[in-house]
Image: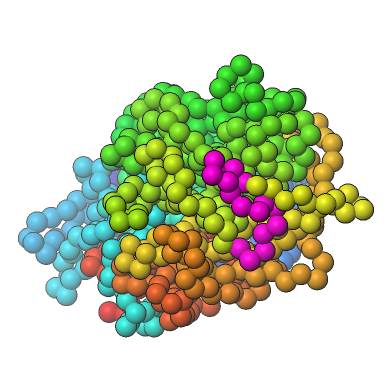
Amino acid sequence: MIMRMSLLSLGFVGALGMALAQAPNGRQQFEARCSRCHGGDATGGESGPNIVARIDGRNDADLGAFLRIGRPSAGMPAFDLPAPEMSALVAYLRVLVPVSNGGPPAEVRKTVQMADGKTLEGRVLNEGMAEMQMLTNDRRIRLLRKTADGRYRQVTSETDWSTYHGDASGNRFTKLTQIDKSNVARLAPKWTFSVPNITQLQNTPVVVGGVMYVSSANEVYALDAGSGRQLWHYQRDRTKGLVGNASGGFNRGVAISGDRLFMLTDNAHLMSMNRFNGELLWETEMADWRQNYNGTSAPLVVGNLVISGTAGGDEGVRGFVAAYEAATGKEVWRFWTVPKPGEPGGETWKGKSGDHGAAATWMTGTYDPQLDLVYWPSGNPGPDFNGDNRDGDNLYSDCILALEAKTGKLKWYFQFTPHDIHDWDAEEPPVLVDTNWQGQPRKLLIQANRNGLFYVFDRASGQLLLAKAFLKKLNWAKEIDKKGRPVLNELKELPNGESYVCPGITGGTNWYSTSFNPGTGLYYFQALERCNLFSKRDMEWEAGKGFMGGTVRPAPDEPYVKSLRAIDIRTGAIAWDLPQADARFPRSGGVISTASGLVFFGENSGSFMAADASNGKVLWEFAANQAWRSSPMTYMFDHRQYIATAAGTSIIAFALPE
């Protein structure tokens, strides 16, 4: 161990000497411009944060570009240095990053005494006054807590949150009851973890075996779910020249199966990693990002397959859902959501949309293991606002697709909005519910759709059982006929070529999570009463550009109202409605409901709240003051229930006081 540390030290000294030789004035540049704020070793000063990790997470070109631009809003000025001086500064910053040799800055191994009399030996991943996180010799993570006599006990999660939705049904309902109506007012933050160098988290954390996994574009953090301490971090550079949502750094989560973690990269690759140390195991290109494909969603694990779609609908990709072998990354099947001429559904695309018909598949589907069916939502057709060159229903856009899990064969489908010209994708969660329907047990699929209608299906056959508007403002359709098709209203074009449409572009609801509580019989979701003025224009598809085919603007002098709504799924009637503040700037905050009668949700003005699931009365509020772009989750760790959510650039985990 002494020899290893000596070699690391020699390596550091050698790297330092080489960098100083290559950049003779790098130290002077750092001392003159950086050290006053960030400290002499870049680990933080009185007016600036530790920047070591931020240096290590950028290549030389990115680091130089960042220094030239700065971040004035955060107090960091721009440094417009001549190229030789900038190169010198970057070179010197590099030597401030500790030599890792593939491991932690200075590997520490320990042997600890356990409360049961045994010992554990391994590499220390992180350590606090009363806890330790260790990678033991069997290459497993052990989460340890110190006992009163100085020994340790191992802790983990008794109830996991193992997928993006919590389970394969897509229903964010938990049977955990430790937090209930009688004590929720005492709920408080237990820990926070901030993700550096991002603008917004859209991630739902996953917890498996006591470890929480948090993602943003092209990076994953593994955390101790009881304290938020970092265990490992994987990161790669973001793709330059990318268009679409992933270019903004969005990634909504990962999937776990056994010892493997699965994640989409921003450039539409699917990769597998060792979940204990972040080692890359395989990587598969799903689609060519140069054709406007990108990746933002959490994959879905079904048996030995990993299933995912891609983003890029607003940029005119050709959508698909595909399944890959979890062990190897080899593609097993692919279902295209825009069929070619001559294929089933191809006759519903009359025109020249062709390979750019969109119908992207950018959210996570759900799965019924008894029927062995995957239910995947598809996006709107493209261009979004102009259907002149895609006459017809445009299958399989705006659909729920029931696919055989092993083969990808289409069992049934339902299209919510044929020939959509308002961007009303069907990417809202398809929730699987087993309950009584008209006196008989039935396997249902329910969805509050972006077009403003609530739907109930028999998920074995695809039979539509109920369709009812959940909005007060809905003018595009009169009703749903017996075949499940909307009966359209004639929307008159205004003199300036615009059309007044309700709901607006963000829809009556959107991609954020929903929840059905079997105890109340109510389905909870965020609804938006909003209208827009739509206009269309002709455009040709181009790589690297959007493909919207028009514009949208707010309807003048009309208020926007965002509400947490509860629907009785048997009738479609709204049981209660909780309007929220500041709906002019709608946030994408989802919900979770509990067996103890609570609904947690991200409220529009920036608070995280809990309401009574039976009547909507607010019982608890935490003023996070963040714009929500995520959905909450829950888990039990070391016999304590946590509610966690992404708020801004941080994960906040709440629990009751000890």
Q: Is residue 378 highlighted in magenta?
A: no
Residue 95 in the image, given as x and y percentages of width and height: 55, 48
For the point 47% across and 71% down, the residue is 575
Task: Work out whether residue 75 can be spotted.
Answer: no
Image-quadrant location for residue 353: top right
Instruction: Point out the residue furthest to the left here.
Output: 117
Which residue is more in the foreground, 113 or 172? 172
- Identify the residue shown where x is 62% and y is 46%: 486
| Residue 455, image x, y percentages | 50, 52
Q: Is residue 105 above or below residue 463?
A: below
Q: Give the magenta part as a residue range.
A: 471-486
Does 476 appear in magenta?
yes
Total labels: the figure holds 0
Task: Pick whichever, 190 or 577, lies toward us.
Answer: 577
Q: Position of residue 505 (x, y in %)?
A: 69, 53
Give the left or right position of residue 275, taking residue 527 as reference: left
Looking at the image, the residue that sits furthest to the top is 342
Which image quadrant: the C terminus? bottom left
Residue at 78% from the left image edge and 61% from the top image edge:
554
Secondary structure that dominates the magenta span? loop
Q: Nearer the viewer, residue 436 or 495?
A: 436
Q: Can you say whether 370 is above or below 163 in the image?
A: above
Q: Looking at this rendering, what residue extends furthest in the right direction?
A: 495
Q: Which residue appears at 73% of the width and 31% of the height?
A: 391
**Left or right position of 508 against 564:** right
User: Would residue 488 appear left or right of 297 to someone viewing this image?
Assistant: right
Q: What colour scheme does the image use?
A: rainbow
